[in-house]
């Protein structure tokens, strides 16, 4: 699948000025395993690679996260790696790894990353 992002001319609200980013998604078993980010001419800028666990993605179809296509995947991302063809990505980890601790209902309650971030989730 493919998503194009356009720059909108604010003075002429709603007028599409130009496409500036194209993202191509590669799927395997309802998970996005690779994303290619290209410029408007479809020249590859970045490739992102994802590995998933077998548990249900707790953010799937959640409107808060709808803009991030990884949250369309069936399972939770446990590792992300990338190729940077333009040399400007400055991520803290390579690869970025996440460890999930699940409750008895199979929902994640703790997410820890190898960059030192820890999130504690509660459900109501």
Image: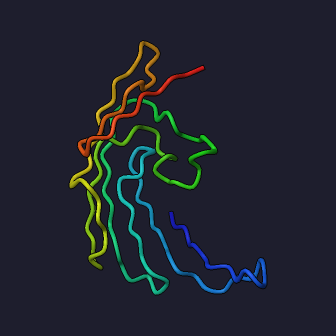
Q: In this view, does 20 lie to the left or right of 16?
A: left
Residue at 55% from the left image edge and 22% from the top image edge:
123
Q: In this view, does 6 lie to the left or right of 53?
A: right
Quarter of the figure with the C terminus: top right
Q: Is residue 73 left or right of residue 83?
A: right
Q: In this view, does 27 lie to the left or right of 7?
A: left
- Of 84 and 12, which appears nearest the observer? 12
Residue at 47% from the left image edge and 27% from the top image edge:
121
Residue 98: quadrant of the picture:
top left
Residue 47: quadrant of the picture:
bottom left
Query: Is residue 44 placed above or below 47 in the rendered structure?
Result: below
User: Residue 116: x, y in percent?
Assistant: 26, 41
The outermost residue toward the left is 94
Residue at 23% from the left image edge and 53% from the top image edge:
93
Snapshot colouring = rainbow
User: Residue 110: x, y in percent?
Assistant: 37, 27
Query: Is residue 97 placed above or below 100 in the rendered structure?
Result: below
The outermost residue toward the top is 104
- Of 97 and 50, which appears nearest the observer? 97
Residue 52: quadrant of the picture:
top left
């Amino acid at each position: 699948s493919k998503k194009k992002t356009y720059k909108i001319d604010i003075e002429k609200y709603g007028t599409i000025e130009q496409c500036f980013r194209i993202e191509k998604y590669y799927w395997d078993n309802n998970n996005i395993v690779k994303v290619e980010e290209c410029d408007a001419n479809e020249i590859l800028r970045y490739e992102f690679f994802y590995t998933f666990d077998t548990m249900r993605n707790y953010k799937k179809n959640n409107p808060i996260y709808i803009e991030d296509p990884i949250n369309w995947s069936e399972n939770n991302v446990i590792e992300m790696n990338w190729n940077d063809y333009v040399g400007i990505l400055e991520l803290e980890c390579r690869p970025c790894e996440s460890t999930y601790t699940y409750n008895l209902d199979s929902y994640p309650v703790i997410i820890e990353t190898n960059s030192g971030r820890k999130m504690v989730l509660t459900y109501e």
